[in-house]
């Protein structure tokens, strides 16, 4: 019996070692079967986070060296040139605005003079409309006049034709198609 006990002890030791590996294999397979998708998605998320952090780390490592930075004198010259160009454009804009104001004042003065002339003509008993027609013709000769030219009377296209009335104004008219089957061969 002693021999049997010794053999059982020897047999139990290798079984314990194999059982530990088997237990580990069972634990991993059960974990994978229950939480496999969660583990997969977690691994993918960790991978992308690591890649993102690696990129940010590379960007901070690539700091510009003094050789890569532009020269201070060049930057100052560019800014001065940019400021001068902006100032020049602002002066041009101010000049155009001043010209526009002067033109508007001149037009307002001309209108005021026309009203005064019309009032004087009316007080004297003359027709004030005739004076405005003469003034309009003289203003139409100048390019800066805001008064538009009177419309010339033009002959209307298609004398009196209106498609909504149903009158046929010419050879164009709609006719319904033939009834019955089409002739074919």
Image (cartoon, helix red, strand yellow):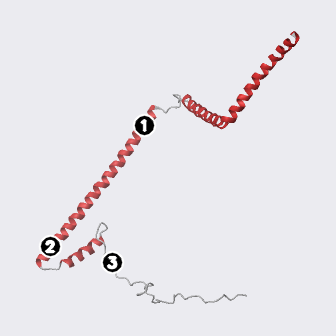
Q: Nearer the viewer, residue 39 or 117?
A: 39
Q: Nearer the viewer, mark 1 or mark 3?
A: 3
Residue occupied by mark 3: 151
Q: Which residue is mark 1?
A: 77
Report how far apart the C-alphas of labels 1 and 3 lie in the structure. 58 Å
Few, some or many C-alpha atoms within 10 Å of disc 1 (few <14, some 14-19, many ≥20)? Answer: few
**Residue 17 vertical placement versus 171 (above, below):** above
* Residue occupying the point 29% across, 58% down: 100
Q: Left of 137 or right of it: where is 175? A: right
In three-dimensional space, the C-alpha distance between marks 3 and 2, rounded to whole angstroms, equals: 26 Å
Identity of the residue furthest to the top in this view = 2
**Of 54 and 42, which appears nearest the observer?**
42
Residue 169 image position (x, y, % from top left): 46, 89
Left or right of residue 82, residue 99 in this image: left
Answer above or below: position of 114 versus 159.
Answer: above
Q: Which mark is residue 119?
A: 2
Labels 3 and 2: the sequence-earlier one: 2
């Amino acid at each position: 019996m002693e021999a049997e006990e010794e053999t059982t002890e020897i047999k139990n030791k290798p079984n314990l070692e194999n059982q530990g590996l088997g237990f580990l294999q069972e634990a991993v397979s059960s974990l994978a079967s229950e939480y496999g998708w969660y583990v997969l998605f977690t691994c993918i998320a960790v991978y992308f986070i690591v890649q993102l952090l690696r990129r940010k780390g590379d960007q901070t490592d690539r700091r510009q060296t003094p050789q890569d930075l532009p020269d201070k004198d060049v930057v100052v010259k560019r800014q001065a040139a940019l400021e001068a160009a902006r100032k020049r454009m602002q002066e041009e804009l101010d000049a155009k605005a001043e010209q526009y104001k002067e033109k508007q004042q001149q037009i307002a003065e001309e209108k005021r003079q026309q009203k005064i002339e019309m009032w004087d003509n009316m007080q004297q008993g003359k027709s004030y409309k005739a004076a405005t027609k003469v003034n309009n013709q003289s203003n139409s000769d100048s390019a800066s006049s805001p008064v538009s030219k009177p419309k010339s009377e033009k002959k209307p296209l298609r004398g009196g034709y209106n498609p909504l009335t149903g009158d046929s104004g010419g050879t164009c008219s709609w006719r319904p198609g033939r009834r019955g089957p089409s002739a074919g061969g």
